[in-house]
Structure formats: structure tokens, C-alpha cells
Image: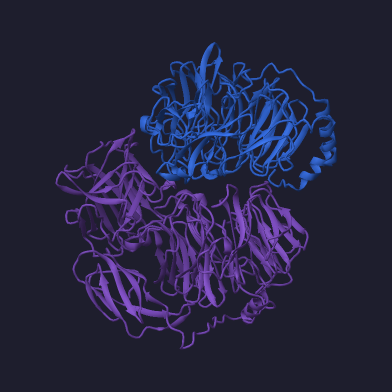
Chain colours: A blue, B purple
Amino acid sequence: MKNRTRQTRGWFWGATAATAALALWIGPHFANVFASDPGSGDWPMWGGTADRNMVSNAKGIVTKWDVAKKENVKWVAALGSQTYGNPVVAGGQVYVGTNNEGLRDPKQGGDRGVLMCFRASDGEFLWQQANEKLPAGRVNDWPFQGVCSSPLVEGDRVYYVSNRCEVVCLDAKGFHDGNNDGVTDEKFKGEKDADVIWKFDMMEEVGASPHNMANSSPVSYGDLLFVMTSNGQDESHVHIPSPKAPAIIALNKKTGKLVWEDNSVGERILHGQWSSPAVGRIGGVVQVVSGQGDGWIRGYEATTGKKLWEFDSNPKDSVWPKTRNEVISTPVIHEGLVYIANGQDPEHGEGVGHLYAIDGTKRGDITKTGLVWHYDKIRRSISTGAIYNGMVFYSDFSGFLHCLDAKTGKVYWTHDMLAAIWGSAIVIDGKVYLGDEDGDVAVLEASKVKKLIYETNLGSSVYCTPVASNGTLFIANRNQLYALEESKKASGWRAVLDLWARR
Amino acid sequence: MQKPVFLLFLFASPALSPLIAGDWTDYRGPQRNGVSQEKDLPSSWSPSGENLAWKAPIGGRSAPVIHGNSLYLMNTVGKGSTLQERVMCLNADTGQVRWEHRMNVYLSDVPPHRAAWASPAVDPETGNVYAFGVGGLLVALDRSGKLVWQRSMVEEQGLVTTHGGRTASPVVHGDLVIVGGVSTGWGELSRAAHRIFALDKRTGQFVWISTPGGRPFDTTYSPPTIADVDGVKLFVVGGGDGAVHALKVLTGEPAWKFEMTKRGVNTGVLVYGRNAIVSHSEENLDTSEMGLLASVDATARGALTAKDVKWKIPGFQGGYSNAILDGDRIFQVDNGANLFAFDFHTGKQLWKQNLGTIQKASPVLADGKIYVGTENGKFFILKPHQDHCEILDSDELGTVPGKEQILASGAVARGRVYFISTENIYALGRKGAGPAAPPYKPETARAPGSDVSPAHLQVIPAEVILRPGESIRLRARLFDAKGRFHSEAAAFESKLEGLKGAVQGVNFAASADKEPQAGVIRVSAAGLTGTARVRVVPPLPWAEDFETLAAGTAPRYWVNTQGKYVVREIERKKVLVKLADNAFTKRARVFMGPGTMSNYTVECDVSATERRRQMGDAGVVGQRYQLALFGNHQRLELQSWQPETERTALVDFSWKKDTWYHLKLQVENLPDGKVRARGKAWPAGDPEPGKWLVERVDALGNKEGSPGIYADAPFEVFFDNFKVTANAPPAPGAKPATSARLEHKQ
């Protein structure tokens, strides 16, 4: 596997172009009854809905574009130099976390973690929150990695976790509505600054000491907002500086006050805690499910924080850091099952991984009792799954996309992207979209038979997951956000001819 | 351009004649551009035997070097508590091991799997081998493996060693061995900065210490190059501050710098004629696109600006693998293992060849072929053409794909190409004795004419530790504006700043008072001034209750202290406070003496606060062992290398916030060669308990080291009543307790 080289890529593309063109033309559309799209046309949080399933019902989304030739590119917005904050779209606005290298405000210079907000229709920059770096430096807040959390947007409220390990609630309208809502002591109150409603400093309030980056993407249920604290090791990498800080907390989303917390992980954190929680109904109970720093997955009763079950994602004989993994992926809750893979910090490179379907109706240590299936052909993964039409689409850090049977874990096919995958495969209108570190983005049929429809390059690494909203596909590479939409000129036969011409 | 002139000049020296085989004495090769003049090298080989002179099951992550028929490399030996760094000498013709020198990593954050990062360098004149450990220990070994001298850069200079493990390989030039890294020392060198240290290759004395740059962003491992640019010998290296720095090599004076990124620079610089090729893969200063390859004017002075950039390619991800030179072309592999050829003069891309997915190693060029391995474990022999690259040979190493990685560059000498993987070392080419390199000829530097006036005064040693009453004879040397040696200064004046003692001409005698000192001897000659930094460290016992120090200061002779620790009066009593949260003060280990002290006991009162559910950690250091109270974990730990956890002895210990505890660490060199470290803690003021709480008898013990203190907390930690006493009576048969025994008698 390691001796793959990109020399084979041209050949591979040539051989598949004909079938790809055919597939594009026929355009098979399967009715998608399992999509987690909220139905509004928005994609208002990481995973679209609280169950985090990377599936969208959006229709009429481009399957072919070329940013170099500006084909099907509606607009492009400049971001910082590194972009790990997956875009979300709600209320006609796009939000993306990036760094401050695409400096928007000279008064707020230097390295910062930045959440940017753009108008979805034309890419107009609306406002930003540019957070200073934490004083302790890389151990808590790695240089130039920006804001890595993906916001949750509910009506006029935007919730995210800043690089300063704060849960932040912002006014979606910013100062454009002429009001300074919530707290009024913002340092910057210009029209293009963020209007803060409240902030919850997880370092101050619950003692979190984030390892390298606080990145959790919030999710809500009722009045409760759930985030991971990213509490982890210090720079010695053998020592947890704040073992009394929780792994997961619930806040009242109106007041920003702590409601419950859990620290079952204690001192057993292997490295960091960079997963995000999911919420869904499992066996009649609304649960928050969270992947934690000891490689265990834990399920809680959402309203009370009562721990219901825990599941060890590592074989008992595994050894950190060679074969024992942490959990960075976000769990997906689908039809009463939890789907999640384990993996490691990309800095640690490639290695063995594990993907599970877990029955969260069981209680206690459910490592044995809750195991529905285990797939060990996946490599280390930091991606989140898409469960669609009885199939699981799951990518790994070694560059493979796996298509499995959702009920049995039996593999239908794998696809090699030939470069590391940081983002996730997403199913949009029956097609799988997936980007990689080389900047390639592939579009495949979401079917039991592998069909590559299209592949293109975005010019620099794609660390994010593409998302669709109201007819537009949004993809970020390292320093640009692209809004892609079928332009009138390049449709129908023209697209097919273009594709043929590429051979 | 100036190339033909330059080549003539370069090749006029017989030692560099393209027709004669040469040694490969440091990471970047004889001309420090990755190129060898060796001929008749293989165009194909196989791990099973074709064109394989020999192979040995010795792996590593740093490049081998070759001098005569000896091959030197650095790797690790042992596992867990027996893991050490090792310098090895192999017969370059057979792969037979001749000798090895093992050294401990101590008091470092470097994890075990990143040890032995740098390549050794050989002095062609003496045959001495210089190796720089990830823990900051610089050793000089002779060709038989005997230790000539060593310097503990962490204890003496506050060198920063990190989890990343990045350690730059040393280079030898003339009488100097030169190393670099981020440090936070004492006095004027307290500010954290990437510094370059030049030492006398025979004695280890500091000749110059240069701080050319600003705030460091990272620790880096850019391999230095030394090149003659318009008659000025420049030492050129990428810095932790995101700039490339050129210094006059004999003096350390900054010549120019090119600030290009907001992160540290790990690639080496390729100097050719009047231009320097620089690269990185991080944030640029002028665009949100990451990465750069550029050609800059190496004859400029001061901070280079846009007008000094001849060409540039923003977006080029050249962050680890170094560029090599082939006539008017350069080759460089980007982070994604794509090998590019560019025109040296214009930056025009000539071709691109993919080799894999991840790249750290640098290519080498010899006999018209490029030899390079990838992190995925594939080794390539390539033939560069003007418009494309031909793959002559490629071999996958090992039986399990990806298990045998190639992280290090190759070396070419004795008619063979040598390279090392994580599992094996390979010698490609003919079997048997290779052609010998010509005998060493010292570089004949053109002395400046008598009409040239001196422009720089160098005082040697640049820094030294003395005992009270000890004398030292300084050297004062003059250099011209081009950095060439001018003359030994004949008449000069010296004065003392912050030092007590007698100074007369070249002679300084430290005051015999048993009190510590830190200051400089400022020497003036020919209208120029130079300084020698001096610390006077008294013999044991030491006792410091901070009462005589002014509030707001810290002991001046302590390393890594200024701005991190400060004396404060609390309830009419002075204590030392580790300052609260900022980038450089969360975790700070202080050293007070030379790294050659042994058989002593360190004691101190400590107290920690609690905030944000976190209580600080506080400890003392002795002979490279650390005894620390961990607040959050309510433990007492005895460590010598924290990330290598098998070396740690620990015991649960309940202690309260804002309460003084007394720590006691005793380290003894035992008659059987082992080292015993043991520690205890108890509430300050209570009688000392009889029992030691933690103990470790270390078979591979640290036999010497400086006393120190340690704190790790986002908040303040307090120290008082620090004392160090010689162990008494000394363990029978062991080395007698030393009191600040100095490593270099002046």
C-alpha cells in the first residue's frame, strides 16, 4: 500500500473516463429516505443534523467543475492560509473557520483563529471573529491552525469553539442589525466584527487544558449545548496537566451556564481529545454520544449527563501509539446504531484502524455486548461516516474510501485517493464527494458497485468536507472557499463533451 | 552569471578536483550542495545483492558520513530504560562495526522514537567526529572512538529540546565546530532565540556565539552550508525565527538575513556563485499561499528585501528535503515526494517526477545520477535529463510495505553510495577497498593585505565557567571586514562588568570570594571591542534563601531564569516565584552550574497554588535526575527523561496547595559504576523522615550534571531555601565528590 505512487493516476483516470461520462449522462437518482439533511436546504452544523450523518438531500448539485478554468465556479472567497473549520450554511450565510493569514482587518493582525461569515449568494464577506492565540502557545493552541470547530447555527445564534478553548455564542446577524446583543464588552465592534452573546471559557470554568487545539463542533438538544473540551496531554506527551477537567460538558445554550459534565476518561487520555459529540434517539432515549481520548466511545442521557454505556474501540492487546488509537472521528447515530472509526493525530502518520457499528441500547461496558460489527480493514481515520441506502461510506487517513454494508460491515468496495484524507466522505443526492490532502476531490456513485464519476484538483489541500445547500456546493481548500454551481453554459451535452475531451 | 568564475575558483583547489574521489564528511557533502565528484557508480542495484557492496542490520534516521575508510552514523541502541543515543563507526568497505559511543538523553522532552536525529560531522584534519544528541549533548570523539571533549548545551546554554526532536547536524570549518539551536541562557543571552555556537574543535572552548535573529517560532534542523561569496566565507542556515541567516563563519557576525516565513525553517540553503536558493513549506509573509522556493542575492548585506529576490515560486512545498545543484539546474523534492528540476538562474520548472507520498530525505547527485529514498521506503536511482527524469532503478525495501522507511539522505564516497533506512544501512557499488580520498590540505585563506584594517575583535573563550580564585588567559583576535583573520591583537585593555576579580591585559583572575558571579570581560583593541562571558560558580556547599537578592531580580548566573523566575517578598520573607502563564514560562527548568558536578544532594522548599482545577508541579534537579511533586496527580516522581517513562520511579504523595514542602534529592555514583538517585518530600518544618520515598539505581546512569530547579504550571510556583551539598561521606571507591569541577582547565 505504501508503494503507491501517483504515476498510476493518469492511467487510472483514462481508463475510467468513459464510464464516468456515461454515469454522468444517465444520472441515476436514488430516492434518499435516510438523508440527515434537515429539509430546509441549510447545512447548519457539522454533519448537517445532530445525528452527524454525512448525507444531504440537496438536489441539482454540481458533479463536475474546474476551478483552474473557472468552470461552474459561482464565487471564490479568500480565507487564511490553513483552513480546517468545515463550512456550514444557514440562513443565507456560510461560516468557516480559518486562520488570520487572509488578513481582513489590519487592526487585528498577527496569528489568530478566525471564524468568517460570508453571504451564501455572492460570497460577500459579512463579519468575522478573530481570536488571539492562547499565551501558552502550541501546547494549547497550535500556530496558524485557525479555528477548527464547525459552528452550529440555530436561527440568529451561532455556536462554536474558539482556538482559545471557549464555547462562543454569536449573533448570526453580527452588528449588521445595528444592535450589540448579549455581552457588550467586545473589543472590536465594527460592522465586520462579531457580536458576542456569551462566552464560556472552558479553561477557566472547568479547567480544560486543550492539547494543541480546542476544536469541538457543538451540537444541541432542547436548551442544551454539548461540546468536548479537548482536554489532553502537555508537551511532555506523558502527562495530563489537568486530570480533573471533564471530557464533555453540557451548557444551557441561552445562558451559557454549565449544566453537566463528565470525566470518565480521567487520566487515561492517550494524547488529545478532538472528537465532536452527536445526538440521537437510541432505544427510546435521547443520547449524546462522544468519542474520547482513551479510545472509548461513551453514551450519555442527553438531559442529565448520566453515563449509559461505554465501548472500547481498541483491541485489548493494542499498544499506544503503534496500534492503540484515540478517537478523532465524530460518531454517527443512524437507525439506533452508532458508527465510528478510531485513528490518530495526522502528525503520527498512517497505521491500523478500526470501524464499528455499536448498539447503544446496551448498558455499562458494552464493548462485547454492544458490538454489532467490527471492520478492521480500515486504516487510522479522522473522518466521519455517511450512512446511506444501507451502505456506510467511510474514509481513512491512508487515503482509502470504504463502502460497507451498514447492517453487516461487509465490504462492497474501496477506492484509493492516493493521498491522506482529513475530511469526510459526504453523500449528496446519491453521490459521494471526497477531498484529499493533494487537493483532489472525487465524485463517486453512492452505490454497491464502485463508479468514479469525476475527479478534479482544487490547487491545494482539501482538509474540509464539501457541503451542499440550496443548490450550491461549498468546498474549501487551504486558503479559499469555493461556491460551485452549474452555470447555464456548461451543462448537458457540453459537460459530456468536455469530459470526453479530457481523455 | 558569475558561475564560470566561481567554478574555476572552486575547482582550482586539488582537494575538490572533480576527477578525484573525496570524503563525505558532513550531511550535505564535500561542497555542501549534495553533490559528489565520484564516478562509476551503480545505475541499478537490488537489496538481494546486485551492486550491493554490503548491507548491515543497522538502522537510523540521520545520514551517514564517510572519512577515509570509516563510516560514521548516529542512531539509538536499547529499548525503554536502556535506550541510548549512539555514535557508530563502521568500516566503510565492509560494514564491520569498529566502535560505538553511547550517550544518555536526559532532562529532555524529546520522545524516545525521535532520538539520534542529527548526522555526525568529521574534521578532515584531525579525523575527530562530532555528534549532537537530541538532548543537547555535543560530543567530540577521536577516530578510535575516544571522547575528546563534550559539552552539555542544555545545562550550559539553556538549549531548548522539544517533543519534535529536531536537531541540526554540526559542521566543521577550519578550527571550528559549529552547532545551532534555540536557547535561553543567562545575561544577554537570556532572550529565547535561535543561536549559533562555534567551538574550538580541539578543546570545545566557545569561540563565538551569535544571535542573528528574532523571536523563534520553532526548533528547527536546517543543515548549515558554508560558502565563499565574493571572497567572504559565509555560514548560511535556516533559523527558528523563519529567516535564513548568513554569518561570517570565523566571527559569527551577521552578514545578511532573509525573513521569509512565520514558522521555523528546516531546509538547508544552496549557495552557488552569488545566489542562495531558499525554501520552506509554511506561511509566507506576503501571501496566504503556503510554501516558497526562491533565489536571493547572497552578496547583499543586512535584511534582504524584494529587490534582492531574483526569482520566487510561492506555493512550492519544500519544507524538509534540501535542494541539490547540477550545473545550471537544481533539484528538490517537495513534502509530497515530487522531485522537481528548476533552472538555477530563472526558476523555470524543467520537469517534475513523482516518487511517493511523503518526503523527508534529501537527494544526492553523483556520476550524473540522483540517489534518493522516500519515507515510504522506496529507493530510486534517477537520470536527470533536460526535459524529463528517467527512472533507472527503484527498489522497495523490506518485506512489509512501509515498514522500512528512509528518513535520511545518502552519502557518496569510496566509489559507493551509502544510505540508511530505519532498519538497515546499504552500501551500493563495488566491493572491496574504494579509492582513497586525497590527503587533507588546509584551506589556504588569503590573508588580508597590511593595508586592510581590522573590523572585528574576537575574544576567546566567548563564554566560560570558572571557580572562585581561578585564572584564565584570554585570546583577542582581529578580523577584517570580510571576516578574514587579520592578526592576534597585540595591545588591548580589558575591563570587568558585573565581575569581581583582577584583570590585566589578557589575564583575568576571579575573586576568591565564595560567591557566585556572572558578567563579562570587555576587551578593547584597535578601536574595537569584544567580550568574554564569565560565570564564577563556587564549590559546594551552596545555600540560597534569596534574602540578599533584590525583589524583581533572579540569580544572574542561573541559566533559563530571567523573565521566568523572579524574587518576591511574601510575608517579609523573600522567595523565588516561577511566573504565571506565558508562552515561555509555563514549564521552566533552571540550571546553575557546570554539567560536570557529581555526588551531591539538592534540597529546596516548594509550594504551588491551585487554579482552574490545576495545581502546579515543582521539583529539584541534580546530576540529570529530577525529583518533582506533581500537584494534579498528587505524586512524587523521580525522572531522568520524562517521555521515556520506564526511567521514572513514582509514588503517590498527598500534598496541599499553598503549603510549603521540602524536597530532597540525592544522587550518588556507586562503586559498581551504577548511579543511585533517591528522593523524599515532607511538609517543610517537620522533622525529616528517615525513609527515602523514591529510588532508582540506574545501570546506565548519568554520572554528572548541574543542580537545578523545575516548575510546570500555568500559574505561580514558589521556591525557597535552595541548597546543594556534597554527599558525605563519598561512596567508597567512587569518584570523590566534586565541587564545580570544570571541564576545561584554562
Q: Is residue B651 above or below residue B31?
A: above
Residue drawn where x is 55% and y is 15% of the image:
A281
Task: Spot the residue most to the left.
Answer: B572
Image location of residue B465, percent across then percent down: 31, 68
Residue drawn where x is 37% and y is 71% of the image:
B462
Image location of residue B309, percent across then percent down: 59, 62
- Name the image quarter holding residue B31: bottom right
Task: Spot the residue most to the top.
Answer: A284
- Asked whether, in this view, residue B587 is left or right of residue A172, the answer is left
Image location of residue A340, percent across then percent down: 59, 27
Q: Quadrant of the N terminus of chain B?
A: bottom right
- Name the image quarter holding residue B29: bottom right
Q: Is residue A335 above or below residue B442?
A: above
| Front-lying residue, B671 or A17 | A17
- Residue B703 seen in the figure: no
Image location of residue B612, percent across then percent down: 34, 33
Q: Quadrant of the C terminus of chain B?
A: bottom left
Task: Spot the residue most to the front.
Answer: A178
Q: How many marks?
A: 0
- Name the image quarter holding residue A124: top right
- Asked whether, in this view, residue A232 is left or right of residue A327, the answer is left
| Front-lying residue, A228 or B746 | A228
- Residue B413 seen in the figure: yes
| Front-lying residue, A499 or B577 | A499
- Asked whether, in this view, residue B630 is left or right of residue A79, the answer is left
Residue drawn where x is 48% and y is 52% of the image:
B218
